[in-house]
C-alpha cells in the first residue's frame, strides 16, 4: 500500500518548487537547440520543430511519467530504483533475470547521476546569458555569476527539500506566469502559431528533411530532461500533488511558451535567444532575474533526485550507505552535495556557455529514460496490464529513436556523461557483487540462530559466563551474528544473558506494521533470547528502542541499561582470481575503507560497544 500525502495547494506549490524546475525552464534552450540543426527556418520547419518538441514532451512526460510511472511507486517512493525493486520483487523472476535487471537498473541510475553534473550548469548558464541581450557590456560576468549562483544553491541544500520547496514554489509560479504570459501575447499577435499543435507538422518535417529532423530529435530531448527527477522526487510530495501541478500549471505554461516562440520564429530569424525574443525590452532585466531564479530551481529537481537515488542505492546495497539527514520526506546527503558542487563548477568554467554544454547534454538522461521504460514494460507485462503495456511499448519505441538520435553527441561532448555513467555503473557493480559475496561467505560461517541455545546447553560448564548482558547485533533473521560463533568457539565465553538482535532491512522505505519486534524466548533457560525486527530502508535502526518495545512483549527480556553491544566485522581476503575479478575486489575494498562503520550509524553507547572481527576469504 502506498504512503498517501495531501495534495492541497501547499503540496502543489512545493512540487512546483522542487519537481518541475528542470522541465519548466526547458523553453530557455530546447526549441532553439532543435532549430540549430534545421536546414532553414521557414514557417513549415519552425512549426515542425515546435510540434516535435511539444509531442515528445506530451508522450514522455505526460504519458510515460505522469500517467504511467507515477503509479508505479514502492510504498510512496519513486524513481528508477524503486521501479527496479518492484520488478525484482516478483517471485516469477528467475535469479539470472533478476541479475540482468539489476545491472540494467545500475546503468540507468548511473546515467542519471552522470546527467546531474550537467543539468545545474546548463540551466543556470542559459538564464544568466540573458544578460548579454539586456546589457551586452556585462557578458564577461556570465560565467562568474553562474558559479556564484550555483555555490549559493548548494549551500542551501542542508535546509531540506520541503523547506526549499516552500521558498522556491512561489518563484516558479512567477516563472510560469511570466513565460506563459509572454507566450500568450505572441500567440494573440500571430494566432496561426496554434497550428503547431497539430502533430502532422512533425510528420511533414520528418518527411521533407529526414536527416535534419532525426538529428534535431536528439536536441528535442532537452524538453523532457528532468522527467526522471520528477519520478525520483515524487516521494517528497506524493503522486497527486505532482500530477495536479503538471496538469494545472506546468503543461499549459509550456505549451503557451513553445507556441509563442513558434509565432515569433515563423516570421523570420531572431537575434539571440528564442525565449528572450518574446520578452519586450522594458521587461528584459526583470525577465532575466526571474529566469535565473527559475533555473536555480531547475537544478534543485536534479539535486534532490540525486540525493534520493544515492540514498536508495545505498539502502538496496548497490552503493555504500551514505551518511545523511532526513529532512521531512526527503533526505540530505552532505557528501553527495559537496562532490557535486566542484564537478558542476568545473563543467561551467570548462564549457563556458549553455550552447557548448548542450552538445554534452541529453544523452545520459535519454539512457535513464530508456532503462526506466524497459523496466516499466517488464513490470506491465508481468502484471498483464495490456492497455498500459501497449502504450508503454509505443513510448519506448519513441524513446529508442531519441536515444539513437543522441548518439552523434558522443563526439561533441556526450562522451563526458557516458564516461561518468560507465565509471559509476562499474563502481555499483563492484560493490553489489562484492557485498553479496561477503554476506554469503559470512552467512556460511555463522551459526543458525536456532543452534545457539543448544550449543550453550551442550557446552555446559566449559563456557565462561561472566555477569551482565550482551546484545549481539545482526541483519539476518536466520543466522546469528558471526561474533556469537567466535565467542563460543574461540573465546569459550558468553555473557550470562545474551540477546541476539537481528534487524533486517526490507526493500521498501518504511516497515509499517512489520516493525513490531518478535521475541523468541526458547533459549531463555540458558540466558539466550532472539529478537527479530524488520525495518524499511528509510527507517533508522535504533537497537535500544527495539529492545524497549520487545521488553513490552516479553517481560523476561533483560534490561539493556548496562548491556554491552557487540558488532561483527568481516575482514575480507579475496582468493586468487582473474584480472577482472581482482580489479572489482580492489574497487570494493577501496569503497569499504571509506564507508562509515555500522557502529557510527547506530544509536548505541560508544563506551559499551565492542567490535569483533574475523578475516574471511571470499571467492
Image (cartoon, rainbow, N blue to C red):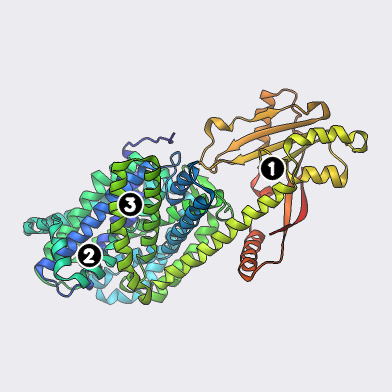
Q: Residue at x 37, y 67 (%)?
A: 146
Q: Quadrant of the N terminus?
A: top left
Image coords of residue 121 (percent x, y): 38, 66
- Name which of mark 2 and mark 1 comes first in the sequence: 2
Measure how far apart labels 2 and 1 are at the Cα level.
55 Å
Q: Residues within 10 Å of mark 1 (few under 14, many from 20)?
A: many
What residue is shown with label 2?
A: 31
Q: Quadrant of the C terminus?
A: bottom right
Res. 170 in view: no
Per the rendering, the mark at residue 448 is none
Measure how far apart labels 3 and 1 are at the Cα level.
41 Å
Image coords of residue 11 (percent x, y): 35, 40
What secondary structure is marked by label 3?
A: loop
What secondary structure is marked by label 2?
A: helix
What residue is shown with label 3?
A: 20
Report how many numbered discs are placed on residues in the image: 3
What residue is shown with label 1?
A: 474
User: In this picture, is 469 found above or below 83?
Assistant: above
Amino acid at each position: 500500500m502506498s504512503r498517501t500525502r495531501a495534495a492541497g495547494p501547499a503540496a502543489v506549490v512545493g512540487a512546483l518548487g522542487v519537481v518541475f524546475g528542470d522541465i519548466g525552464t526547458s523553453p530557455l534552450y530546447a526549441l532553439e537547440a532543435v532549430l540549430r540543426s534545421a536546414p532553414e527556418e521557414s514557417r513549415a520547419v519552425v512549426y515542425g520543430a515546435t510540434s516535435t518538441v511539444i509531442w515528445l514532451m506530451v508522450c514522455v512526460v505526460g504519458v510515460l511519467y505522469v500517467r504511467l510511472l507515477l503509479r508505479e511507486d514502492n510504498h510512496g517512493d519513486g524513481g528508477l530504483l524503486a521501479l527496479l525493486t518492484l520488478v525484482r520483487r516478483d517471485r516469477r523472476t528467475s535469479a539470472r533475470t533478476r541479475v540482468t535487471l539489476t545491472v540494467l537498473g545500475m546503468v540507468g541510475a548511473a546515467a542519471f547521476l552522470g546527467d546531474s553534473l550537467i543539468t545545474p550548469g546548463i540551466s543556470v548558464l542559459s538564464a544568466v546569458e540573458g544578460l548579454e541581450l539586456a546589457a551586452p557590456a556585462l557578458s564577461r560576468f556570465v560565467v562568474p555569476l553562474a558559479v556564484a549562483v550555483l555555490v549559493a544553491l548548494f549551500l542551501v541544500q542542508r535546509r531540506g527539500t520541503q523547506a526549499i520547496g516552500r521558498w522556491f514554489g512561489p518563484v516558479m509560479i512567477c516563472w510560469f506566469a511570466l513565460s506563459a504570459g509572454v507566450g500568450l501575447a505572441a500567440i494573440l499577435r500571430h494566432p496561426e502559431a496554434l497550428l503547431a499543435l497539430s502533430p502532422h507538422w512533425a510528420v511533414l518535417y520528418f518527411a521533407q528533411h529526414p536527416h535534419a529532423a532525426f538529428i534535431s530529435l536528439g536536441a528535442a530531448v532537452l524538453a523532457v530532461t528532468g522527467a526522471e527527477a520528477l519520478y525520483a522526487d515524487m516521494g517528497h510530495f506524493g503522486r497527486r500533488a505532482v500530477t495536479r501541478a503538471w496538469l494545472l500549471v506546468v503543461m499549459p505554461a509550456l505549451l503557451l511558451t513553445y507556441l509563442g516562440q513558434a509565432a515569433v520564429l515563423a516570421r523570420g530569424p531572431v537575434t539571440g535567444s528564442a525565449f528572450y525574443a518574446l520578452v519586450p525590452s522594458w521587461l528584459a532585466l526583470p525577465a532575466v532575474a526571474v529566469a535565473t531564479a527559475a533555473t536555480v530551481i531547475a537544478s534543485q529537481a536534479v539535486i534532490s533526485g540525486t540525493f534520493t537515488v544515492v540514498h536508495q542505492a545505498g539502502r538496496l546495497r548497490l552503493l555504500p550507505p551514505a551518511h545523511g539527514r532526513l529532512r521531512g520526506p526527503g533526505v540530505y546527503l552532505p557528501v553527495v552535495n559537496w562532490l557535486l558542487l566542484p564537478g558542476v563548477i568545473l563543467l561551467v568554467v570548462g564549457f563556458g556557455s549553455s550552447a557548448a554544454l548542450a552538445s554534452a547534454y541529453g544523452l545520459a538522461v535519454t539512457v535513464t529514460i530508456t532503462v526506466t521504460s524497459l523496466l516499466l514494460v517488464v513490470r506491465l507485462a508481468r502484471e498483464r496490464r495490456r492497455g498500459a503495456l501497449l502504450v508503454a511499448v509505443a513510448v519506448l519505441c519513441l524513446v529508442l529513436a531519441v536515444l539513437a538520435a543522441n548518439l552523434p553527441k558522443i563526439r561533441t561532448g556526450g562522451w563526458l556523461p557516458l564516461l561518468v555513467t560507465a565509471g559509476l555503473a562499474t563502481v555499483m557493480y563492484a560493490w553489489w557483487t562484492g557485498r553479496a559475496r561477503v554476506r554469503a561467505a559470512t552467512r556460511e560461517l555463522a551459526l543458525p540462530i536456532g543452534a545457539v541455545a543448544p550449543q550453550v546447553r551442550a557446552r555446559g560448564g566449559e563456557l565462561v559466563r561472566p555477569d551482565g548482558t550482551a546484545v549481539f547485533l545482526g541483519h539476518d533473521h536466520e543466522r546469528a551474528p558471526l561474533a556469537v560463533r567466535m565467542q563460543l568457539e574461540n573465546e569459550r565465553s558468553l555473557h550470562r544473558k545474551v540477546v541476539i538482535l537481528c534487524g533486517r532491512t526490507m526493500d521498501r522505505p518504511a516497515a509499517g506494521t512489520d516493525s513490531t519486534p518478535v521475541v523468541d524466548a526458547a533459549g531463555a533457560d540458558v540466558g539466550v533470547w532472539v529478537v527479530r525486527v524488520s525495518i524499511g530502508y528509510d527507517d533508522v535502526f535504533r537497537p535500544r528502542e527495539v529492545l524497549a518495545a520487545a521488553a513490552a512483549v516479553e517481560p523476561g527480556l533483560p534490561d539493556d541499561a548496562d548491556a554491552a553491544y557487540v558488532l561483527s566485522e568481516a575482514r575480507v581476503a579475496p582468493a586468487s582470481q582473474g584480472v577482472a575479478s581482482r580489479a572489482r575486489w580492489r574497487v570494493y575494498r577501496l569503497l569499504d575503507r571509506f564507508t562509515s562503520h555500522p557502529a557510527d550509524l547506530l544509536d548505541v553507547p560508544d563506551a559499551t560497544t565492542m567490535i569483533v572481527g574475523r578475516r574471511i576469504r571470499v571467492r
